[in-house]
Amino acid sequence: MQLNKTSLARLIKFSLAGGINTVVTYAFYAGLIWLGVHFNPALAGEYIVGIVLGFLLNRIWTFSDRRHLDHPFRKYLATYALVFLVNLVLLNALVWAGLHPLPGQAVALGLATLASYLLQKNWVFKSRQKQVIRQQAAGAMAKEEPVLETSGVDG
């Protein structure tokens, strides 16, 4: 995978937005654990907060240069439903193996973050701008009147 300036900038923005989102949602998760909430409902609460905050950060900032998106919030929800399931399975496996839910979630979050970035970049916020421009150009050319060529002979 070769990174150009735009891709590198987007990856940095995604990392920063993700860092902000992770700090906020992990603090929320830790607070719920501290209050005695079981780790599975705490994880669900963390994801609900994270989905809303993450979508706003990524749509407004990380992928702001991408236009003509098809149903980005629905795709974002589908992405996070899948990422949540992966995270849930990993967290439960780590807790079952004897790890406390707080460090367990920190470990599970790494794989969940990678899956999230790849899905957002290549599906949720994938721009259709080039396709739309091609369609507009094709439509404009189809509407033009045909040009009659003459052989240069008056007649």
Image (spheres, rainbow, N blue to C red):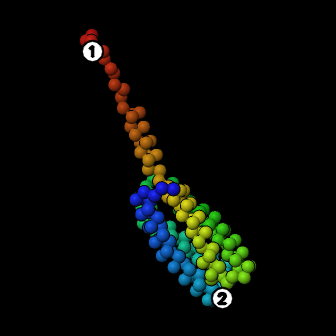
Q: Earlier in the sequence, mark 2 or mark 1?
A: 2
Q: Nearer the viewer, residue 134 or 3?
A: 3
Task: Classify residue 65 by image quadrant.
Answer: bottom left
What is the three-letter code of the residue carrying label 1? Answer: Gly
What is the three-letter code of the residue carrying label 2? Answer: Gly
Q: Residues within 10 Å of mark 1 (few under 14, many from 20)?
A: few
Residue 60 appears in the rendering: no
Residue 10 appears in the rendering: yes
Q: Position of residue 82 (x, y in %)?
A: 63, 64
Indicate the secondary structure of the residue bearing disc 1. loop
Vertical comparison of 137 with 106: above or below: above
Q: Residue at x 70, y 77 (%)?
A: 94
Contact? badges 2 and 1 (CB < 8 Å): no
Q: Which residue is mark 1?
A: 152
Q: Residue at x 32, y 20 (%)?
A: 149
Q: Position of residue 133 (x, y in %)?
A: 41, 45
Task: Classify residue 92 by image quadrant.
Answer: bottom right
Q: Nearer the viewer, residue 72 or 92?
A: 92
Indicate the secondary structure of the residue bearing disc 2. loop
Q: Is residue 76 left or right of residue 134?
A: right
Q: Residues within 10 Å of mark 2 (few under 14, many from 20)?
A: few
